[in-house]
Amino acid sequence: MVAQRLKQFWSRYWGVLSLLAIWQGLVYLNNLNSIVAPSPFAVVLALINNVEFFAAETARTALMASGGLALGFFLGFAMACCCWTAPALSSLLTPFALLIRSIPVVAFVPIIIRLAGYGSHTVLTVTAFLSFFPWYVFALSGFRDVDATRKDFCRALGCATEGISGWRFFRHIAIPNAMPNLLTALRLLAPTALLVALVAEFLIGSDGLGYIMIRARSDMQMDKSWAAALLASALSVIFFIISSRLDTKYRKNWQL
């Protein structure tokens, strides 16, 4: 029984265990100082000795990333709805959205700090603004990419297919047609939102895993810095797995 469980454990986590072994081997063979590269044992020990602290900071980063992702969705979806209802708005709003999306995170954060100040709300704002444009593009593309046959069928029944008068078509046809696009956007944006939140925490210096990485590095506590980086990587994988499973689970329900 024990041998079987060990075999199952190895078959699932052999990649992670191999990376840890390579990491430990490089540190040992090159006799690297802990300030340059701490060993896996030192990083794990830092996690164990500060488990409550790292749990709180990980939860805070996850909350900022998921909250920013959700807020970005509402902004992008609402903007796409407005542009579908009034197509003339698309030529006005799309360049503005593209301008915001093209600003690098490093350059965007000081602008938000100037407007909103320091704090967790700034991290949330940065994450939301830099994730809303893909939501907007995927949603609007789904609204507009309705099959021509369905449009002709709706017109034959006397149902408008565009503008404010086409609300029934938008609700029952356009929105369901956009759901696969939105699920794809979720799968792509979930890890990206986490990365943006980490960079914002790194630059703003308030709290969260991004802040811990830079603060521990400045205090020469490299084991804590690497532990925070390791947790951030694990959190990114978790975000991707959850979003991928949601995509797989619900996509078939929205196939028209």
Image (cartoon, rainbow, N blue to C red):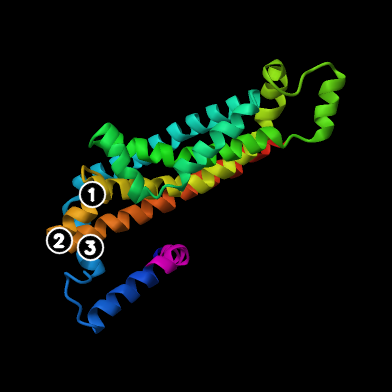
Q: Quadrant of residue 217?
A: bottom left
Q: Nearer the viewer, mark 1 or mark 3?
A: 1
From the image, tell me which residue sits under label 1: 211
Check disc 3 and give the amino acid type.
Val
Query: Which residues are the magenta region?
Result: 3-16
x, y (%) of residue 102? Answer: 46, 47
Q: Is residue 67 above or below residue 235?
A: above
| Residue drawn 29% across the image and 40% down it | 60
Q: Earlier in the sequence, mark 3 or mark 2?
A: 3
Q: Dominant secondary structure of the magenta stretch? A: helix
Number of callouts: 3
Tell me whether the residue at label 3 lies in contact with that at label 2, contact meaning CB atoms closer than 8 angstroms.
Answer: no
Q: Which residue is mark 2?
A: 221
Q: Along the horizontal axis of the image, is 193 left or right of 204?
A: right
Name the residue that disc number 3 marks. Answer: 43
Mark 3 vs mark 2, foreground winner is 2
- At numbered mark 1, what does the secondary structure look like: helix, strand or loop? helix
Left/right of residue 141 with respect to residue 219 in the rendered view: right
Decide: is 70 above or below 48: above
- Type of the residue with mark 2: Gln
Residue depicted at x 31% and y 38%: 112
Left or right of residue 145, residue 97 in this image: left
Q: Residue furthest left?
A: 219
